[in-house]
Amino acid sequence: MLLFSSRKKEGNEKPWKYSIIYKEDVGNKPIISPQGFLSLSPMPAHNHLHIKDKPKVSVGPTSVANASRMILKAMPPWKALKLLSRLNQKKGIDCPGCAWPDPEKRSKVGEFCENGVKAIAEEAQHKLAGEAFFKQYTIESLRKQSDYWLGQQGRLSQPLIKKEGSPRYEPIEWNEAFNLIGDHLKSLPHPDEAVFYTSGRTSNEAAFLYQLFVRKFGTNNLPDCSNMCHESSGVGLTETLGIGKGSVTLEDFEHAEVILIFGQNPGTNHPRMLSSLEKAKRNDAKIIVINPLKEVALMKFKNPQKIKGWISKGTDIADLYLQIKINQDVALLKAWLKLLLVDERCLDRKFIAANTEGFEALKADLEQHSLDDLISQTGLSKEDVLLSSHWLAASKKIIACWAMGLTQHVNAVDNIREIVNLLLLKGSIGKKGAGTCPVRGHSNVQGDRTMGIWERPTKAWTDKLKDAFNFDPPESPGYNVVEAIEAMNQDKVKFFMALGGNLLPAAPDTLLTEQALKKCDLTVHISTKLNRTHLATGKTSLILPCLGRTDKHIQNGKEQVVTVENSMGVVHGSHGSLTPPSKHLKSEPEIVASIAAATLGNDDINWSGLIEDYDNIRDLIAKAIQGFENYNERLKNDNGFELPNGARKGEFNTPSKKAVFSINQLAESIPEGHKYVMMTIRSHDQFNTTIYGMDDRYRGIFGGRNVVFMNESDMKSEGLDKEDVVELSNHYGLERKVAGFTVVPYEIPQGCVATYFPEANPLVPLHLTARKSHTPASKSVGVNIRKL
Ligand SMILES: Nc1nc2c(c(=O)[nH]1)N[C@H]1C(S)=C(S)[C@@H](COP(=O)(O)OP(=O)(O)OC[C@H]3O[C@@H](n4cnc5c(=O)[nH]c(N)nc54)[C@H](O)[C@@H]3O)O[C@H]1N2
Ligand SMILES: Nc1nc2c(c(=O)[nH]1)N[C@H]1C(S)=C(S)[C@@H](COP(=O)(O)OP(=O)(O)OC[C@H]3O[C@@H](n4cnc5c(=O)[nH]c(N)nc54)[C@H](O)[C@@H]3O)O[C@H]1N2
Ligand SMILES: [Mo]
């Protein structure tokens, strides 16, 4: 059976072209019927797309001009200036963009980047999506708008309900909403029938209260965006080094001899990292980039925070650019390990003997592989692999950085552990200028996990919670993102709540995810802005509008501070400073505490008392979580404080108290019958599912997002020309298709293609996940391409 949905935009606007098709496999039970499903953002047809040459340098004055244009569109100049002068400054606002840390000495010109400015312009805009807006638009009509359009409608300004059978959202009183949630949760036959999702912008205070409420309610169903993000890093690092977080500090970048950057595009996603790389270069570090795409910012960078950055030609970043085939990182790492093992002098024998286990087994395993085979799998030249191995051999201080290019594959955990093998061979951990650097995504995603947003908490963690609060936390593991979607589809879960995020377009298999949400009896969203997940409603649905990072939080007449943890384990405050866009908004901690009170009733925690002063919440955190002793006192230091990190000091909290060499699998090949490996990546104009604009300047794409980047020889063999429109499909159990994608010839290894997230998510099978971490393998999806 072929199921098909497509539409054209009416009226005098430009035509839109869009379709998704799912086909059931023979013998498979019918699980989906997309009639009435329109779960993806409609996109402009290819004739509005302009493909240009890539620029030769990143950031610099163009970036400043773009950022200024964006923020001045969202707010008046005085407000923009006030906001930017406080962004990432001491006692200022922590940027709601990425999790890259702030240097001790902040730039006076501004400690922010183009994409940070876009993030705050998106949040702090003065336009409101209020009562009149929701009267005008039914949910069905909103579904026909693009993600970009939804984001442009302004901040949510009052609590809303979609009642059973109603076509639209309408206002509801806060208390009525809280009671509705409480009554619903109390009526569930078992707490495990409810799922509580979180996205990584949530503050430590809100996250702590949320998990405490959920565990007191009786379930560990706390999936979060981490499950789709750095979960593989957490799993791989915990197994081998005894801590799921990175080990380096910002200062280490100034002492490193070699910096490896795997599967990461910092020019777009962590622009302030480029300043650290620039410093490292000044100290003669060699930078090796491992990435299927030549990302402009990793080649040349102009620092806008320095006069030199405005007038000079820019700094060369990569000393060597290894344009590897998608998901062949383990092959490259194994080739390096083999080459290092050839000469004893390349290894840190003393470190290996004193601090590690499993070295002999690793050595024996590497002997099973031929160097030539490994190198040929990577698609790289032998000269480049040898040259880079010489640099590694000569160096004693190596930092390895990585992001989604390594964590979103079936063998993602293997990727991480193989990096650890390399660092251990070189003794490059637990000392200055060396270590692991998983570069986190959301600004507080690491803090949320520290606060207990985790569907599989350790026993030691829940024991401490138990002691602090005198209750029995649930013991059985909860659902992660993929399991939660599956459970909703199987009617095992009837309640879905999200503290931030936009699960529908972020998750794999968009149509299955939409179906899952729609099967719930009650869906609840705590959000700042309208998004597509709000439109896949359960029978009843609530939107609870909250304050954002930039807004002033006042409780009891007193300005409140929230706290976050950056990518390097430093906890510090964030002081919102703008008058909230509507007086009907509540803070995330207040919303969570009110839901807890309405659900748990006569509880021994005084939920409403807690939020009168967030210091009260931090006192509880200090009691329950290791490393947060004297929390309020230590926050008085404007630079914040560092959480304990064994690996940073060369102490490994594994069962044997040693760092562990591991044996890892080479990448699995894509299933037979597929010709290309597809990675789904971010453009320069988006923050995950929030679309700031239609351009991807650094890749030469303007005016559209439905594109597929292809190698020219692959295009030739498919008989494709530049700007041909194609359909992408695959068959993992179900047949999945998306159509209306424009071909862009690009410097990408043969057999590899790239598309944007979230447009290509209907092609990512829900069950194609990493071993152990269950992260969707959204960077290595088999596809075929057909001209339309
Ligand atoms: N402006 C902005 N900032 C963001 C975000 C955003 O959307 N916009 N998102 C935030 C979040 S949540 C996250 S997790 C991070 C994401 O930050 P990134 O991980 O940088 O984001 P992606 O675009 O997913 O980029 C993945 C990179 O990996 C490469 N890659 C893909 N597959 C492979 C592979 O198999 N091997 C190797 N070696 N490389 C590969 C791609 O070419 C690309 O350069 O950024 C955070 N910061
Ligand atoms: N194919 C593919 N899929 C992917 C990825 C990929 O690379 N490829 N990347 C994955 C990754 S790394 C991640 S992290 C996930 C992201 O998944 P999510 O975290 O679920 O998605 P976001 O787009 O970051 O969420 C944006 C929404 O958060 C809400 N929001 C913003 N700020 C606030 C706030 O301060 N408070 C509250 N309560 N709400 C707020 C707004 O309503 C906004 O619409 O997507 C994953 N999905
Ligand atoms: Mo992420």
Image (cartoon, rainbow, N blue to C red):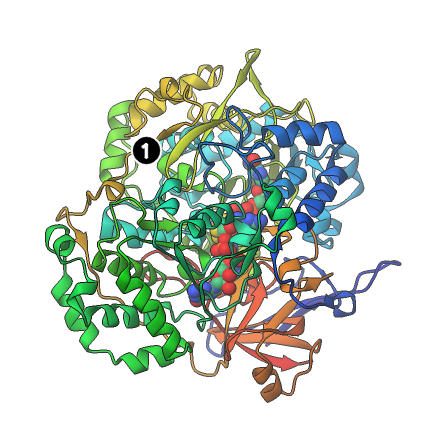
Compared to 581, does 558 lie above or below? above
Residue 10 on image: x %, y %: 84, 60
Residue 557 in view in this figure = yes
The residue nearer to you, when weighing 87 against 416, is 87
Task: Find out if the beta carbon at label 1 lies less than 8 Å from the nearest ligand 3 atom.
Answer: no
Callout 1: SS:
loop
The percent position of residue 343, horizontal first and vertical second, equals: 18, 70
Q: Is residue 120 left or right of residue 569?
A: right
**Above or below for 684 versus 608:** below
Q: Is residue 633 above or below residue 772?
A: above
Residue 562 percent location from the top left of the image: 48, 26
In this rendered view, identify the residue nearer to me: 608 or 720: 720
Label 1: how many Cα within 10 Å (few below 14, some 14–19, many 20+): some
Residue 20 can be seen in this image: no
Q: Is residue 255 above or below residue 630?
A: below
Frontmost residue, 61 versus 294: 61
Point out residue 569 in the picture as x, y percentages from the top left corner: 37, 37
Left of 348 or right of it: where is 582? right
Residue drawn at the location 63% of the way across and 37% of the way down = 120
Query: Would you say 279 lies left or right of 131 here?
Result: left
| Count of number-bearing discs | 1
Q: Using the image as rendered, state which of residue 539 and residue 450 is in the foreground.
A: 450
For the residue marked with disc 1, what is the amino acid? Leu
Picture quarter with the C terminus: bottom right
Q: Quadrant of residue 56?
A: bottom right
User: Can you tell which quarter of the image residue 319 is in?
Assistant: bottom left
> Looking at the rendering, which quadrant does residue 587 occupy?
top right
- Image quarter (top left, top right, bottom left or bottom right) of the N terminus: bottom right
Identify the residue under disc 1.
643
Residue most extreme to the top: 557
